[in-house]
Amino acid sequence: MICYQFPPDMGVGSLRSRKYAQYLEDFGWECSVLTRCFGRDRKVHFPGTVTITSVYAPDLSQWLGQLVRIVQSLRRWLRKKCSTVGSTNNPSAAAALSSDGMGMATQIQRMFLLPDTQFLWILAAIPFALWKQRDCRVIYTSAWPVSCHVLGLLVHKLTGKPWVADYRDEWTLNTQWLPPTRFHRWLGEKLDAACVRNARFVVNTTEIRTQNFIHKFGGNPNKYVTIHNGYDQQDIAPYLALTPPAEVLTLTSIGSLYGGRDPRPLLNTLADCVHSGLIDKQQLLVRLIGVQSESLQSQIDQLGISECVHVIPRIPQLQAFEHLAQSHIALLIGSEMERYAMTTKLYEYVGMGKKIFALVPPGPVQEFVVRCGGICAMYNDTTQIKQALMVIFDQFRQGLLSQNSPPNQTYERRNLAGQFAALLDACLTAAE
């Protein structure tokens, strides 16, 4: 398993791979992991028979950040000197000196760090990957960063062993991939196509992404597989017995709001419903957990709904799960990103058996929520949001939201690891 992001990195990027490694042993597979070295402590404790080798490589993006800070300090010093001698009467000089230089590091990274800022890790990890693969029968890579796939391609070419490429995030199909020159686009397209062509299986996290890969890269459609992200039963089991209050309709969103995810249309609609008497604010509680914004809190105060809308800064995941378990509705505030991407929190919502209210455009998230019996509205359409809120409030008054739905076991992490183990088995069958 070649995974740049893996414990002790406990971010979202490492979650999928570390859960595979945790549960694959139940299906007859042992994992040997190659990952990035974080800090001086190279020892990683992981359950079961998993062996982990961590490789250090310099992160040039950090070096560039330090360079930018030095340039900024120099610019501030020069600006101060120029102001002393009156040089800032020259508009062009003043503009140049007032630039903070933050765009410099980004431009350098985009021009010279290919295929991404972790490319030096490929060079450092190659000998370790070739050494570790001697006792392995299948190669697995997880990206982002896409350097992992390039390393997987090299190891596959040098050893001939079957390879599974897991695209947690797309590369050239990613709408955020904006190469600075034609050469960068050409190189990225060639490398991405080579990875897809040589992998025995190409895994995506949603069916729409799988179909996009088939449409762009072609070949045998059976090599393209969808394995969703999911939830871990052991993480949420302690909270399944908790129930929401009978007298207050409670909606809870967990996780930060980024990528254009804007709660203001929902807040404006809530304020309108409360002030017009359609919703009694004594019977409503909306919690936005993981959000820290003074401007958002100021807007809530101005709308006069601070009694029923609470903004809660980032808290430990287990506390967030407890709040979610004591809610009638799991709230998802989306943006244009949800036309293509699936957010991980959805699976935790389903694992809790919660009814989902999603403010999203048409796409995989909307299809998923509807399939799970949830309610959707366009994230920036206050009319749709209002109609959905009225439906939810009517269901609450009728007592239809007091009981959780049975968790959907399809998205439980161990079952997903079983799907992945079936791909590994198929790799051996094809090789024979």
Image: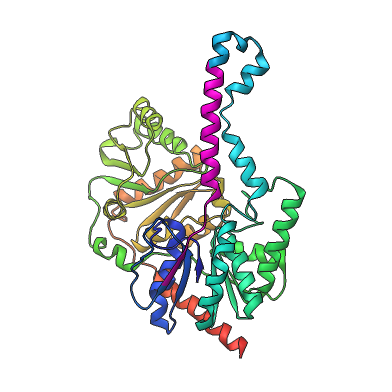
Based on the picture, tell me whether residue 66 belongs to the magenta stretch. yes
In this orientation, does residue 36 appear? yes
Give the vertical position of 114 relative to 384 (above or below).
Answer: below
- Please state if 181 lies on the left or on the right of 122 as rendered: right
* Residue 225 or residue 188, whichever sits in front: 188
Question: Can you give x and y, in whole percent of width and height, for residue 75 in the image?
Answer: 56, 25
Q: Residue at x 62, y 17 (%)?
A: 94
Q: Residue at x 60, y 22 (%)?
A: 97
Question: Can you give x and y, in whole percent of width and height, for residue 24 in the image?
Answer: 42, 77
Based on the picture, tell me whether residue 429 belongs to the magenta stretch. no
Question: Can you give x and y, in whole percent of width and height, for residue 36 in the image?
Answer: 47, 61
Give the vertical position of 415 relative to 72 (above or below).
Answer: below
Outermost residue toward the bottom in this view: 432
The answer to which image quadrant residue 306 occupies is top left
Name the dominant secondary structure of the magenta segment: helix
Which colour style is shown?
rainbow
Give the vertical position of 139 relative to 216 (above or below).
Answer: below
**How many numbered discs, if any?**
0
- Please state if 251 lies on the left or on the right of 168 as rendered: left
Q: Residue at x 55, y 42 (%)?
A: 64
The answer to which image quadrant residue 121 occupies is bottom right
Question: Can you give x and y, in whole percent of width and height, for residue 374 in the image?
Answer: 43, 56
The answer to which image quadrant residue 174 occupies is bottom right
The stretch of residues the image draws in magenta is 52-80
In this orientation, does residue 178 appear? no
Give the vertical position of 323 relative to 195 (above or below).
Answer: above
| Quarter occupied by the C terminus | bottom right
